[in-house]
Image (cartoon, helix red, strand yellow):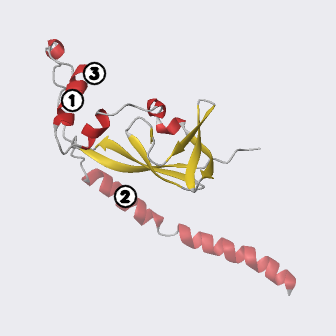
């Protein structure tokens, strides 16, 4: 019984494969007919336009990104009474405002007389800050200090050029051992 199955399986496979090959002549004939009948319709590409270089004329004008132009715009903004920026420009800058916020890291917190203080590391120096202190280059003012976070509000320009308040945080950075 086992020997008949061993002989029957290869014979059955050969029969099935031979059946798959039948009728391919008709398919080949149809494919050749389709190739002859179908004509590709490709529109020719347009020739490239001739490049005509133009001299840059605006070099004598005001540079749009000049510090002078930015300073004038900030002064005009500060003269407006409802401006968020006017109060910020009329006060003395604090030392931590000369560093970008991403260069600071919170390394701890302490409480004295029920007032929270955060310990910030900037350029390998430790600074002790409290609510109301300023830090960062976007007029950031500390609004809240917890054991793990310093919350502050920054004043930045939006896409339309308006000055808006934006929240920011510094998270406690655990030291790798």
Q: Where does label 3 land, which residue?
A: 67
User: Does 145 sit above or below residue 74?
Assistant: below
The quarter in which the N terminus is drawn is bottom right
Query: Who's the residue at 32% across and 42% down the image?
Result: 156
User: Does 82 sit above or below residue 5?
Assistant: above
Q: Where does label 2 land, which residue?
A: 31
| Percent x, y of residue 102 | 50, 38
Distance from disc 3 to disc 2, alpha carbons, whole Å, reads 71 Å
Upstream in sequence: badge 1 or badge 3? 3
Q: Where does label 1 land, which residue?
A: 75
Please tell me whether mark 1 or mark 2 is closer to you in this view. Answer: 1
Distance from disc 1 to disc 3, alpha carbons, whole Å, reads 12 Å
Query: Who's the residue at 13% across and 14% down the image?
Result: 57
Callout 3 secondary element:
helix
Say few, some or many: other residues with alpha carbon within 10 Å of mark 3 (under 14 / 14 to 19 / 20 or more).
few
Please tell me whether mark 3 or mark 2 is closer to you in this view. Answer: 3
What is the residue that sits farthest to the front in this orientation? 113
Dots 1 and 2: beta carbons under 8 Å?
A: no
| Percent x, y of residue 19 | 56, 73
Of 15 and 103, the residue lying toward us: 103
Query: Who's the residue at 23% across and 20% down the image?
Result: 68
Please tell me whether mark 1 or mark 3 is closer to you in this view. Answer: 1
User: Does 71 sit above or below residue 152?
Assistant: above
Callout 2 secondary element:
helix
Distance from disc 1 to disc 2, alpha carbons, whole Å, reads 78 Å
Of 141 and 100, the residue lying toward us: 141
């Amino acid at each position: 019984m086992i020997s008949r199955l061993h002989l029957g399986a290869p014979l059955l496979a050969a029969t099935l494969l031979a059946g798959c090959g039948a009728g391919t002549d008709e398919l080949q004939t149809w494919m050749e007919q389709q190739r002859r009948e179908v004509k590709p319709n490709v529109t020719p590409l347009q020739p490239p336009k001739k490049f005509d270089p133009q001299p840059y004329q605006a070099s004598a004008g005001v540079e749009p990104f000049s510090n002078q132009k930015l300073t004038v715009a900030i002064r005009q903004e500060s003269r407006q009474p409802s401006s968020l920026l006017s109060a910020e420009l009329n006060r003395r800058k604090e030392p931590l405002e000369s560093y970008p916020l991403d260069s600071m890291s919170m390394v701890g917190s302490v409480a004295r007389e029920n007032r929270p203080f955060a310990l910030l590391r900037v350029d390998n120096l430790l600074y002790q800050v409290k609510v109301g202190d300023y830090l960062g280059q976007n007029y950031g003012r500390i609004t809240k200090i917890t054991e793990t976070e310093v919350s502050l509000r920054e004043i930045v320009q939006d896409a339309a050029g308006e000055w808006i308040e934006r929240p920011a945080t510094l998270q406690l950075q655990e030291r790798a051992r």
